Image (cartoon, helix red, strand yellow):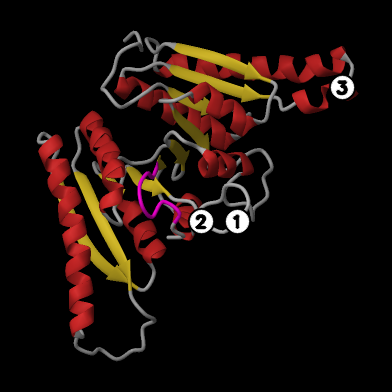
Amino acid sequence: MDGTTGPPGLGRVVVGVDGSPSAQAAAMWAAHEAVLRGRGLCLVHATDTDSVSPFFTPAQLAQPRRAGQELLDRTVAAVAARHPDLAVVTELDGGPPADSLRRAAALSGTIVVGHRGRGGFSSLLLGSVGLMAAAAATTPVVVVRGAVEPAETGTVLAAVRDENDLGCARAAAREALLRKVPLRLLHVWGTGPYTGVRTPLSNSEKSDAREHVRALAEVADRVREEFPEVALRAEGEKSHSVPGALVEASRHADLLVAGGRRAPGYLGPTLGRTTLTLLQHAHCPVELIPRHGPGHGSTS
């Protein structure tokens, strides 16, 4: 495989490596993804020394560059041992890691990061580089979670909130097509706190439920029309915790694809509550698709 051609809509795969076990797992996942796509793999290591270069000697600045190149060379060798025909390039950048990844991905690449960086703080469920890459990206970002060698479940899961998630569902269909597995579209809507008493649905609640089902059906119909070869099932459910329901569903997926929503009202890029919860707690890799159209600033 020469790594130069692949399905439309899927660019090259760019993965950040920093020497952590999480980044190593991300590199192996990214290599497999690149093979599936028939695209090349780009390994990026950022020394983040450009901003401090005036305060150090050339010899001091050369040390992190040497260490970074050695890390890239070791990662290339590890990838080649599993995928000897995969075209791999490396980039050693002096800028901040998240910026370096975005530059390497350009307009169509997919960024892949591990779920935790070298900092090792147990409370930092998502590493700062992964958080910044996911919050500010304009191309897809995959945060590799789950076991280092996960058991394949044979399903790609897409979280669909409304019609504006059609792009997310399309991306999930492409991933399912590559893996030759079924696609599950899941729409979860929130309910009020559980009181322990079951009561009949009011007319407004029934109308609300019909609207949720309609939105899911519209997305599902479009995906079936565009990807007739993908086995698809669409399911809707209500839950007291939308993030919790999606995290639980991720136990049974090889990949969870979701819209990368931003939370409004803050300075700088940040992530919505549901999106952040998935990146912190999902049981499988999570691919965030930049969301275009109304509602892209939702906190959900």
What stretch of residues is rendered in magenta? 290-297
In this rendered view, identify the residue nearer to me: 191 or 15. Answer: 191
Query: Above or below — where is 197 with respect to 239?
Result: below
For the residue marked with disc 3, what is the amino acid? Pro
Task: Judge whether residue 16 can be spotted in this image.
Answer: no
Q: Which mark is residue 54?
A: 3
Packing grade of label 1 (10 A; few <14, some 14-19, many >=20) is: few
Q: Calculate the distance from the C-alpha at mark 2 to the C-alpha at mark 1.
A: 7 Å
Of badges 3 and 1, nearer the viewer stands 1
Residue 295 highlighted magenta (yes or no): yes
User: Residue 256: x, y in percent?
Assistant: 35, 46
Residue denoted by label 1: 266
Task: Judge whether residue 300 can be spotted in this image.
Answer: yes
SS for callout 2: loop
User: Residue 218: x, y in percent?
Assistant: 16, 52
Residue 75 highlighted magenta (yes or no): no
